[in-house]
Amino acid sequence: MVFNLLSLMLLQISNARLYLAVFSAVLGNFNFGYSLVYSSPVLPRFKGPDADPQLRMDTNQAAWFGSIYSLGAAAGGLGAMFLNDLIGRKMSIMMSAVPSTAGYMLMGGAVNLWMLHTGRFLTGVAGGMTAASIPVYISEISHKKVRGALGSCPQITAVFGTLTLYALGLVVPWRWLAVAGSVPAVIMVVLLAFMPSSPRRLLSLGQVQKAEKVLRWLRGSNYNTNIEISAIQVDINTQVKITWAQLASPIYYKPILISVVMRFLQQMTGITPILVYLEPIFAKSNLPVFLSLRYDAAIVGAVRLLSVAVAASLMDKAGRKALLYTSSMLMFLSSLTLTMISHTTPCPAINITTPAYSSHTELGSMLQASQGTAMSLLPLISTVVFIFGYAMGWGPITWLLMSEVLPLVARGVASGLCVTVSWVTAFALTQAFTHLVDAYGLYVPYLIFTVVCVFETRKRSLEEIENYFRTGRTFTIKENHPSVVSS
């Protein structure tokens, strides 16, 4: 009895310092979400008649400003793959503040276009570094009871960063928006300087005593580190490196190929260009005059934050299969609606000038105005539904499944490949979006996104794919098999 009580005391965990470390790290994800959509409120200023002649953008320059971020993110993600093992996860996150701050300072003080494009690219590099490093750091410092909950923090804080950018864009000039973007990165570096390195990183370097000290700092002074230290050490010792020749084996290349295709399809839904060009899209959507484009963007940002929270709460209750089908259907219906709206030309109003029908004319005008207002709200409503559908299914679940399906021994290289494919696809779409809109209108890119959503609903669910690679034989999911695997 006394021994059991002593064991319970030694295993007592305090999460206060762990939460502080996680908060310090996810400030980088906040900056990622902020920088991703920086172009949304800024591009209308650069393309407007009042723009500085040295900074005025045509269609091609605007396309590069919106899309070059994705190229930077791909480069940053690849760089983080090597930095995570070379200097550690914490230092990789801290180093992301260098390109982030430099990029924002370039944009904030820009006097020509190359400063804007270079700054945008550098903030993309920082975003790619944080997106690849922060989830790894959080998973390695967290214990299993809170790892799943804390694992959702990077996405939530990234969405919150997006909402903050939209909100600040209502009142802050574009130069000061750039200056404000550098503040979270500086705070992140200051806080992380006092946070510990990953225990797994320390053990991989043979620093056992430091790893024990870090675990006690993260878990509390009463925590017995022996069990966790032993488990991490065994995992490190049993890891093997895979050769390129072994990747040709179906057990490796098939799940990798599926993960890459899923990341490609996820981007092909059009989520990145819609977020990046949100205000310019609304400017072309004939929204009611009483709605400010900037307020519309803020509304979408708030809905996106809400939908991420809903997805996190439903993940284990509804199951990923149901969420994915619901997500695809919502995205299909909303993109189809946007396609039809953007391709429809409103009929001109008929002027009735006969005095005998003046009262009927006034009533007709009122009805026509109310009907027109309701119809003109459809682009905003459909965009909100599209964002909601993506954030509750295809957004988080494809990342979650990728972490479960990819072979452990090839996960580092394979995840880097998935990230690269994802951001290169995002770059191509974002680059082409502006040109397509200017040449053909919004309905052409919306039509492409609709076709992709139809394709997704016809394919096998991600849950069935996961089951295939777990069993190695069948796509069929037995009823007694749990539909949700805890993350």
Image (cartoon, helix red, strand yellow):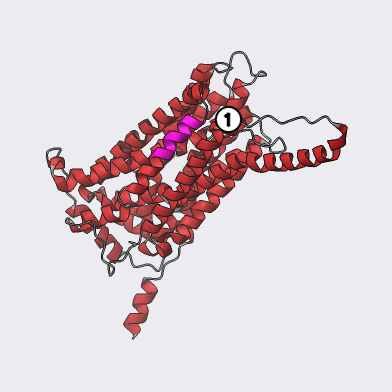
Q: For residue 448, which quarter of the picture? A: top left
Any part of residue 432 in sight: yes
Q: Which residue is mark 1?
A: 280
Q: What residue appears at the point 80 percent right and 37 percent down from the top-left corner?
A: 361
Residue 70: image x %, image y %?
42, 31
- Category of crowding for the residue at label 1, using alpha-carbon neighbours closer than 10 angstroms: few (below 14), some (14–19), many (at least 20): many
Question: Quick check: is 396 in the magenta stretch?
Answer: no
362 on left or right of 431: right
Q: Which residues are magenta?
A: 442-451
Residue 365 higher or lower than 140, as above or below: above
Amino acid of disc 1? Pro
The residue lying toward the viewer, choosing from 403 and 26, is: 403
Q: What residue appears at the point 53 percent right and 17 percent down from the top-left corner?
A: 113
Q: Secondary structure at mark 1?
A: helix
Q: What residue appears at the point 59 percent right and 17 percent down from the top-left corner?
A: 56
356 on left or right of 235: right
The residue lying toward the viewer, choosing from 467 and 34, is: 467
Which quadrant of the rendered structure holds the N terminus? bottom left
